[in-house]
Image (cartoon, rainbow, N blue to C red):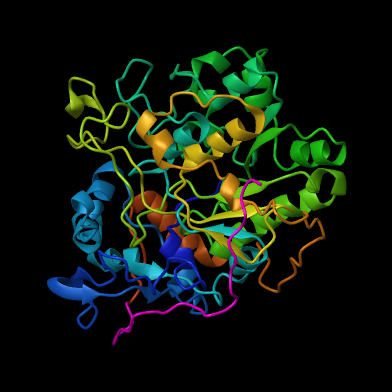
Amino acid sequence: MQENRSFDHYFGTLSGVRGFDDLTPPVVFAQTGWNPATQAVDPAGTTLPFRFDTTRGPLVAGECVNDPDHGWISQHECLNGGANDRWLPTQAQFSALPGNVPVTMGYYTRQDLPIHYLLADTFTVCDGYHCSLLGGTTPNRLYWMSAWIDPDGTDGGPVLVEPNIQPLQHYSWRIMPENLEDAAISWKVYQNKLLGALNNTVVGYNGLVNDFRQAADPRSNLARFGIAPTYPVDFAADVKNNRLPKVSWVLPGFLLSEHPAFPVNVGAVAIVDVLRILLSNPAVWERTALIVNYDENGGFFDHVVPPTPPPGTAGEFVTVPDINSVPGSGGIRGPIGLGFRVPCIVISPFSRGPLMVHDTFDHTSTLKFISARFGVPVPNISAWRNATVGDMTSAFNFAVPPNSSKPNLDHPRLQALPKLPQCVPNAVLGTTTKTSIPYRVPFPQAMPSQETTPVRGIPSGPC
């Protein structure tokens, strides 16, 4: 799982998908609230999606833009009850500097994201994959691990925003690894621990097993398999020695996570490194599926209105008596989700492309996929969500023999170290002051269009 990118922000120009050429109502590409001609907040001004140019100088490079606000409050404001028309006014309300407002509308192209587009052309891209919650990192990652944020507050929640300090051993609801344990299905969470304790106490970029009381005993399997394994060392060793468990959660590391303002193509290095480790052992690769997804949209615009449940739907609204006591709630009880679309690529010998799938998924779909494969129930998932999202089996092309040949992963932009330093100034600004070096919106504007090739097929799904 990577960080903080929306589908339109990454793949709005990709051929075949539901991107910038989509005219399905409501058509909301022209957002009001910023005037590109004056480069100023303007309730009457209109801004179209615009390209982040990654070839500009280091201080203004489109690759180094910090993410807009994307908390529980602001994401509900953007959605605006389904009108999906308040992206710019919301950023004007929450941004520390006016010049940061329009970055919500920025996007990348194949020229900027050559590796991501190469992977999308080689495997299956999902254009209906949503984050689980209208909000940020921690609650969405909790959905990825457990399909739950405890909206009734009985087990340490509700969790609507990122805590300033991660609450280690605080939550107590059931997580998917416990169900796998009970069914004797092997599993591990592999984490890059380069930042040491910061991963768990400040950044919050971990496998989240640490945050559950059940894992407090270091001798327990939850601690042994959910906290101790490292990436890349233990992951590579397990692949090499045919010890990779049946289910793995992989976190390559915060600096490689694609979190703005870290360079997007540094994240491509992380994805390709995971894939290369899998390819190093053909016996492992030929029976593996790698699902690359993103925890949330990072405040970046996406034009598709996510499915949401009717008011009062069980498990999909916060029901604690005092909503104002819940950190970051702003008095909003829901809906919890679905959140906005995020990129997702399914990489496997069984999903060789170029393929695309239009079905509706979210982070709980990965748990439903595990359930479909191994017969292990998904904990906590609400009846509405279970009926709304698929189990990802439709992303695979089981009607044809698997293709386990090695894909071409060579590209001159597949490099990490030269890219990181140029984005340090903006990353520091974003971390310490919640501001960013303003990115000037191009003017005059034109609506972007999608590529016409390659033509993408539809995978067969289960046969």
**Between residues 293 and 90, which one lies in front from this camera angle?**
293
Residue 308 percent across, percent down from the top left: 29, 43
Residue 341 percent across, percent down from the top left: 41, 54
Main SS, magenta residues? loop
Residue 444 percent across, percent down from the top left: 29, 87
Q: Is residue 47 above or below residue 392?
A: below
Residue 149 percent across, percent down from the top left: 38, 28
Q: Residue at x 80, y 55 (%)?
A: 404
Q: Is residue 360 left or right of residue 350?
A: left
Query: Does any portion of residue 227 appear in the rendered image?
Result: no
Q: Residue at x 55, y 34 (%)?
A: 367
**Between residues 87 and 447, which one lies in front from this camera angle?**
447
Q: Is residue 274 above or below residue 47?
A: above
Q: Is residue 433 above or below residue 412?
A: above
Q: Is residue 75 magenta?
A: no
Q: Is residue 367 above or below residue 152?
A: below
**Between residues 106 and 449, which one lies in front from this camera angle?**
449
Which residues lie in the magenta part? 441-463
| Residue sitting at the far front | 463
Query: Does any portion of residue 265 appear in the rendered image?
Result: yes
Q: Is residue 53 left or right of residue 291?
A: left
| Residue sitting at the far bottom | 444
Q: Residue at x 16, y 75 (%)?
A: 45
Q: How many marks?
A: 0
Quarter assignment of residue 59: bottom left
Q: Is residue 396 left or right of residue 107?
A: right
Q: Is residue 450 magenta?
A: yes
